[in-house]
Amino acid sequence: MPLPISFLSDFGHDDEFVGVVHGVIARIAPDVLVIDIGHDFPRGDVQTASLALLRSVQYLPEGIALAVVDPGVGTDRLAIAARTPWGVFVGPDNGVLAPAVAMVGGADLIVSIEAAEFRLPVHGATFDGRDVFAPAAAVLASAEAEITDLGPSVDPGQVVPMMIPLVEEDAFGAIQGEVLWVDHFGNAQTNATPDDLSSIGLESGSEVSVIIAGAEQRLPWVDTYADSQPGDALLHVDSYGQIAVAVRDGRADETFGLGVRTSVTFRKPVDDDELHIVAADDD
């Protein structure tokens, strides 16, 4: 039975690119199911796409993951396939596969996709999603080829990693993080977790001082949107277990000017009376 292919790209839907990749897969392996994870990720934004694949892979059926966000297409970056306990990940060697591969247990074999019989014969070198990655994914999904047929093995130490930004606790007991993702509804997922906030004495139900790009807000940490009033800003644990900034019935990205990589700091609120006491002690 053929394996499904889960497909992610930054191709968008204004052009024919997504459909063409589907078509290449269908011509090679017409019985293979293709699941579209998403195709409107920012052009060339490898980190955003890699985090989307990371969020998604735990909910996808085992099989082939095809991720094509490839600003280095046409250069000497490798086209790779990585075998894992979940299945095989296919895409450019630029870090887009790395977090998801690690999530499912790591790769026991990585190969460079070089075999001519599994590439489309073309003159250009700007659409490897169609010409290299789609055929490789299709023959793997249909068992027309093994991963070892695609090309020579690659030293895992030479594969490009993806460094996901980690939070830091500063000398004043604040958690410094950043926005990883803004979803369709304007909710901003950060790289902070509930454990990170708990480590500085915050918990669900707390009021949290949130500094966004230098401006301080006091937001309640709630369990659900229904715990706040329409139009209220809030913090909550999102569906992937991260702390997110949201506005009930609104958009946090527009309200606070949030975007991917915007700095966000969390700390316990300090009352004016406490500030006066600290100032007096300093004197």
Image (cartoon, rainbow, N blue to C red):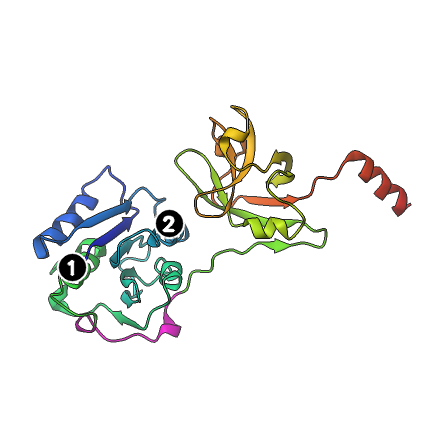
First along the sequence among labels 1 and 2: 2
Q: Please rate how many residues cluster around mark 2, counting C-alpha atoms within 10 Å: few if below 14, some from 14 to 19, many from 20.
A: many
Residue 156 drawn at (x, y percent):
36, 73
Which mark, by number, is residue 135? 1
- Is the magenta region chiefly helix, strand or loop? loop
Q: Quadrant of the C terminus?
A: top right
Q: Is residue 214 visible?
A: no
Q: Nearer the viewer, mark 1 or mark 2?
A: 2
Horizontal placement of 78 versus 183: left or right? left
Give the structural element (helix, strand or loop) at label 1.
helix
Helix, strand or loop status at disc 2: helix
Q: Does the image show residue 182?
A: yes
Q: What type is the residue that disc 2 sits on?
A: Ala
Residue name at image x 62 percent, y 40 percent: 210
Q: Quadrant of residue 150?
A: bottom left
Identify whether 62 is placed above or below 215.
below
Compared with residue 209, is residue 24 higher up or lower down, i.e. above or below? below
In 3D space, how far apart are the residues under numbered discs 1 and 2 (Cα atoms)? 23 Å
Residue 52: mark: 2
The magenta segment: 148-160
